[in-house]
Image: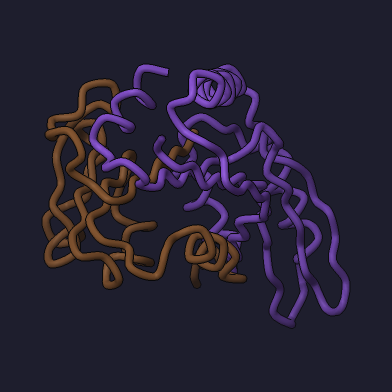
Chain colours: A purple, B brown
Amino acid sequence: MHALSEVRRVLRPGGLLIDLRPTARNRQVELELAEARLRIGEIDASNSATEKLQADEALQAALDEGLFTAEHRARFEYITDLDTQEDLREFAAGLRRSVMPEGLPRRIAALTAGVREDYLIRIRREMIIWRLRRL
Amino acid sequence: MAIRGDSKGLESRYLFDMLPRDIGRVLEIGCGDGRLTRKYADRAAKVVGIDLPGALPRDDQAEGMMDVAAASGVALPFCDGSFDQAIFSLSF
């Protein structure tokens, strides 16, 4: 919660804090091929589950302490589209805490082997966004 | 070949729904390479982005868009009431 106290300090009274972060849900990986959407698997996000829980608890504590008031909250999907398996490798290389299962790229490679038409690899990540007002 | 983040524009839509029309002076905590900042910086009077050393944007990524500082969220090097809005952008 100390970070939230600091944010409150540097905000003018009545200023807004927009808190945007991923939820604890794993990223979902899909393959769009021809007219089909295939669910391929998930990218494990459990390595950061503790930090996410701590962030949730810190936010609730800040609300309970009256540092902020919650005006609005929403969940949405952050969608990343990849055109090729090379893009998927590049995406996987950029993951910091999450883990892409080894079998997932192999599964995509098998499904797209010999396919002439374009396909799309879609990664869905659930996000939560809060609008909080500094009291 | 392309990696298209926020391909449906939902992050942008929700962010702008949450922000006021006049954004003013913004502190973005966890700015990284400026990916989120690029979405709203032209509507802000001033943007300051902070992140841990090694995670900050390159000079060419930040130039003209925001001032950057290596800092932790638990010890912000700014005076009281310096900002109109703050954006806490965490990625795990």
Position of residue A70 measured from the top left corner of the image (x, y, whole percent): 56, 39
- Residue drawn at (33%, 68%), measured in percent from left and top? B22
In the rendered view of the protein, which quadrant contains the C terminus of chain A?
top left
Quarter occupied by residue B7: bottom right
- Residue drawn at (55%, 44%), measured in percent from left and top? A130
Side (left or right) of A98 relative to B89? right
Residue farthest bottom in this picture: A117
Position of residue A51 measured from the top left corner of the image (x, y, whole percent): 52, 21
- Residue drawn at (72%, 48%), measured in percent from left and top? A106
Out of B35 and B84, give the one closest to the viewer: B84
Out of B1 and A22, give the one closest to the viewer: A22
Out of A36 and A84, give the one closest to the viewer: A36
Position of residue A95 measured from the top left corner of the image (x, y, whole percent): 49, 40
In this rendering, is residue B47 above or below B9?
above
In the rendered view of the protein, which quadrant contains the N terminus of chain A?
top left
Position of residue B64 measured from the top left corner of the image (x, y, whole percent): 13, 67
- Evaluate whether residue B15 shows in this view: yes
Out of A120 and A135, give the one closest to the viewer: A135
Side (left or right) of A85 relative to B28? right
- Evaluate whether residue A47 shows in this view: no
- Residue drawn at (26%, 61%), measured in percent from left and top? B24
